[in-house]
Image: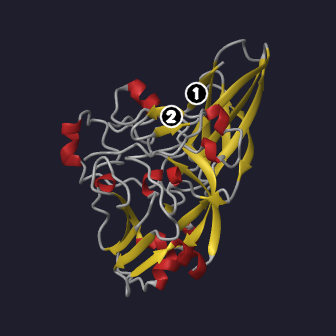
Amino acid sequence: MSMDYSTEPPRSQLFIVQSAQPFNAEPPVSSLVEFNITPHDLVYCRNHGPVREFDEETYVVTIKGGVERELNLTVPMLKSTFETVHVVAAVQCAGNRRNEMSAIKPVSGVGWEAGVIANCKWGGVRLRDVLSHAGVQQQGNSHVCFASYATLCQDDEYYGSSIPLDKAMNLEDDVLLAFEMNDEPLSADHGAPLRLVVPGYLGARWVKWLDTITVSPDESPNFYQQRDYKVLPPTVTSKDEAKPLWGKCPSMTSLPLNSVIGSVTPTSPTSIYIKGYAVHSPAANVTGVEVTTDGGKTWREARITYQEGKWSWTLWEAELEGVSESGVVHCRARDATGEVQPREGTWNLRGLAHNAWGMAKW
């Protein structure tokens, strides 16, 4: 399949480019943790093919499958027919921190540091409102499949994913068909003119350039739902060993409790100032972050400086006195259920969901 990258949009000069074609890039984590809401120029780019620009006035999303009537809607029709709502939610690539996992043992995938996350204010219409308007037929364990046929894709004829219909229809889960990010129209890199927003789920499910929604009794058959973004057993060390297991391992939904150190600044010969982020577990929000400079023998509580609603990330900071002129600091998060971020992550072939203690040197 021929991929044309000649019309790619301009990008921020702040990015660390991890692959040029397709364009995959992240900002420095030290910059990320300076903002509660991630500015556009610091929102990571994750692509599986060329980025195209589309006309919002004529772009159409089709709703079909297990519905009473098939709909073909433009973005202006969505805006005029349904209530526009906003939700603050963090989107995170499942491969965030992959380079740390690959240092344990090689993994397969784009090399990422810890900047493949963004906390944004998304604007759009509720998926449940659109599905209800189409006369969705709820049956058992149905799924809603999402597809973008609009752009070329590396591993399949289109990019696709799915989520359970129950999640799509749950008012409290805030699933959106989004056309705004941070009170501005979406940019091409982030899925304009329409993308899916699934708060609490990994970014691979947030389909960009969304053009097809299908209510189905089955998960999406797409490569990225069935043969990627799955945590394989740590005993699987090659693609050949993985082949018989893709169909047996569940598709990823949420990512685990995690925290990362964004910056460490010495403020005197014996004191440091630390900033970082944390992300909630599937079960509950972050309630605290601790830091240690002695490998976990003693922990000191960090101060949470930002947390907004159910789906945002958590920003935190800590000032430590009585430290040496150089050393290593770790962090770990805990949530409302009492779960604590583990000291070590679980290695897997795709390098997904790495959530070992955060670490930085000074």
Residue 226 visible, this angle? yes
The image shows residue 296 at horizontal and vertical percentages of 60, 27
Q: In terms of image quadrants, where is residue 142?
A: bottom left
* Residue that appears at 49% across and 33% down: 17
Q: Amino acid at mark 1?
A: Met
In the image, residue 107 sits, relative to residue 144, either above or below, namely above
The disc label shown at residue 359, or none = 1
The disc label shown at residue 282, or none = none
Helix, strand or loop at disc 1? strand
The image shows residue 196 at horizontal and vertical percentages of 49, 62
Residue 66 is left or right of residue 127, and the answer is: left
Residues packed near mark 2 inside 10 Å, few (<14), some (14 to 19) or many (20 plus) = many
In the image, residue 141 sits, relative to residue 278, either above or below, namely below
* Residue that appears at 59% across and 38% down: 12
Q: In terms of image quadrants, where is residue 247?
A: bottom left
Residue lying at the far right in this picture: please name it: 268
Q: Amino acid at mark 2?
A: Ala
For the residues labelled 1 and 2, the Cα–Cα distance comes to 9 Å
Q: Which residue is mark 2?
A: 356
Residue 87 is left or right of residue 234, and the answer is: right
The image shows residue 249 at horizontal and vertical percentages of 29, 51
Q: Nearer the viewer, residue 78 or 331?
A: 78
Q: Are marks 1 and 2 in contact (CB under 8 Å)?
A: yes
